[in-house]
Each structure stands twice: as structure tokens, then as C-alpha cells.
């Protein structure tokens, strides 16, 4: 997979009122210049409350939109939850599943995330499935084992490059300004790649692997140029169109 086919994904988390749609529009408007000639895919995962209006605001642009979570059921008595077909109906083409904040705040397990990814696929959404170890697990030397187990349990059979993206996000790097070394990222991405290859054969080679956790304009090129990194999942820096576009521009200039 070439660096040309990267995915730069924003995750606005629980941020964004109506006024933030101007920021979304500025991202969409700046994309052609930021991508230059490169075939970079750009995505923003919005709070569900902004999805329909966001879709309206960026219609006719190359910016894709996503949700940040979905229920494993397609509809039903699940107060306060959102179903994958609802996200699709509101204008999403992607949905994040298994983000570490959902794992922590809502006790989400790999088995649940597995079912959510399947629900995303049933609705025709691309699942951006997050994996990653805590600081304690890394310090104990268990990072590969933990992420390996997450991959095995959370990724459903039937994974394919056009409907699954894996985001490796070390929990300790999210929102902290701390980033792993390039060697750590390379080791983990290579490990995930081997796992996908063993399980899904040639298709496993094509599934995009993103890095996420404190990606900023000034470290984006270094992180995105690591082998087997095909894009980034970006929280804080996706809230500001200048930062987000600068990261996309950094991706576009990689060989
Ligand atoms: P951050 O968040 O870029 O603010 O560290 C990344 C994420 O949680 O996806």
C-alpha cells in the first residue's frame, strides 16, 4: 500500500455546537489545496448531533463524515444509543468503534466492539476499529500481547479493505502530547499487519492501519512516514481547520 492512499481522519469527540460547522466547511474548502496531487482521503467523525447538518455543509466536497460509535443492533429499545443505519441515513460513511474512551467510559469489551463493527458493515459503513495499550501495559512489556488480543477478539471475520480500517492508538498518547517513538509505532504496525495477513491472507495486506494519539502538524510527517502507517486518527488537532489541513498537507508531501 502506498503512502498516496492515506486516510487522515478527525475525531471531534464530544465537541462541537452549530458554530463549529464553519470549521468543518473550512476543512472541506481547504482540502484540494492541502491534498495537492496526492490521493489522500479525509474524514471527520462528528458528534451525532451535527451529522446531518455537517453533511449538508460539505456536500460536493471530498470530505467524508463519520460517527464516533454505533450500537450493535440496527434499531430497537436502546434509549440514548445510535444505530449504524441512523448514522448512514444522516450522512456518515464511516464510524469509529472501540475507541479507548468508549472502552473506558462505557466498559466496552472486544466482543461488543466485534458486534458493533458487524453492525457498521450491515449498514454499509466503514468501521474504524481502535486498538491500543495503556501505559501500565506498555511498561509491563505487554503492549503487543494486548493489541494482538484486541485484534483477534474485536475484528470480525469478513474484514476487507473497503470496510475496515484499524487505528492503533496507545491510550497513554491520547490527548497527552506524548507520542511513542517511530520504532514503537513501526513495531506495532508491523505486528498488526502480520496478524491481519495471517488471518485474512492477501486482503489483510490491504487493510489500512492508522496511528492515533497526539498527532499534530509538527509531528505528523515523522509519524506518517513510518512503514505500515497509512494515515492518522486525530482528536484535538482536528478541531481547528488550520491544524487539520496542515496534517493533511504533511501527508500529501510524503514520498
Ligand atoms: P488526540 O486524540 O489526537 O487528541 O490525542 C486522538 C484520538 O483519541 O483519536
Image (cartoon, rainbow, N blue to C red):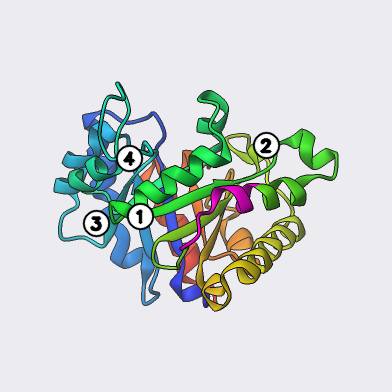
Decide whether residue 59 is among the magenta residues. no
Residue at position x 36%, y 36% in the image: 71
Kindly give the residue lying farthest to the right in the view shown: 140
- Residue 204 in percent (x, y) is at 56, 70
Name the foreground residue: 159 vs 29: 159
* Observer able to see residue 138: yes
Q: Mark 2 points at which residue?
A: 172
Q: Which of marks 4 and 1 is in front?
A: 1
Label located before the other in sequence (4 or 2) = 4
Mark 3 falls on what kind of element?
A: helix
Q: Mark 1 points at which residue?
A: 121
The span picked out in magenta is: 150-158
Q: Nearer the viewer, mark 1 or mark 3?
A: 1
Q: Which of marks 4 and 3 is in front?
A: 4
Q: How far apart are marks 1 and 3 (CA)?
A: 29 Å
Q: How far apart are marks 4 and 2 (CA)?
A: 23 Å
Label located before the other in sequence (3 or 2) = 3
Q: Mark 4 points at which residue?
A: 46
Q: Mark 3 points at which residue?
A: 29
Q: Distance between the residues labelled 1 and 2?
A: 29 Å
- Residue 81: give its label: none
Amino acid at each position: 500500500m502506498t503512502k498516496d492512499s492515506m486516510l487522515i481522519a478527525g475525531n471531534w469527540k464530544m465537541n462541537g455546537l452549530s458554530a463549529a460547522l464553519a470549521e468543518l466547511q473550512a476543512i472541506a474548502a481547504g482540502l484540494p489545496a492541502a491534498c495537492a496531487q496526492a490521493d489522500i482521503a479525509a474524514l471527520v467523525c462528528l458528534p451525532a448531533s451535527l451529522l446531518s447538518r455537517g453533511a449538508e455543509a460539505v456536500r460536493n466536497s471530498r470530505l467524508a463524515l463519520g460517527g464516533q460509535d454505533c450500537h450493535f443492533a440496527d434499531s430497537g429499545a436502546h434509549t440514548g444509543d445510535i444505530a449504524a443505519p441512523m448514522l448512514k441515513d444522516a450522512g456518515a460513511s464511516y464510524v469509529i468503534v472501540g475507541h479507548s474512551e468508549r472502552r473506558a467510559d462505557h466498559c466496552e469489551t472486544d466482543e461488543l466492539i466485534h458486534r458493533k463493527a458487524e453492525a457498521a458493515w450491515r449498514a454499509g459503513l466503514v468501521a474504524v476499529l481502535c486498538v491500543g495499550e495503556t501505559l501500565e501495559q506498555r511498561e509491563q512489556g505487554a503492549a503487543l500481547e494486548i493489541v494482538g488480543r484486541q485484534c483477534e477478539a474485536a475484528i470480525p471475520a469478513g474484514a476487507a479493505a473497503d470496510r475496515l480500517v484499524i487505528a492503533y492508538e496507545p491510550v497513554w498518547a491520547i490527548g497527552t502530547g506524548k507520542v511513542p517513538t517511530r520504532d514503537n509505532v513501526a513495531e506495532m504496525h508491523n505486528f498488526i499487519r502480520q496478524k491481519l495477513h495471517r488471518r485474512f491472507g492477501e486482503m489483510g495486506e490491504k487493510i489500512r492501519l492508522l496511528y492515533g494519539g497526539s498527532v499534530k502538524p509538527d509531528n505528523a510527517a515523522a509519524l506518517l512516514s513510518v512503514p505500515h502507517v497509512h494515515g492518522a486518527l486525530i482528536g484535538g488537532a482536528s478541531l481547528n481547520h488550520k491544524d487539520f489541513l496542515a496534517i493533511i498537507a504533511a501527508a500529501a508531501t510524503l514520498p
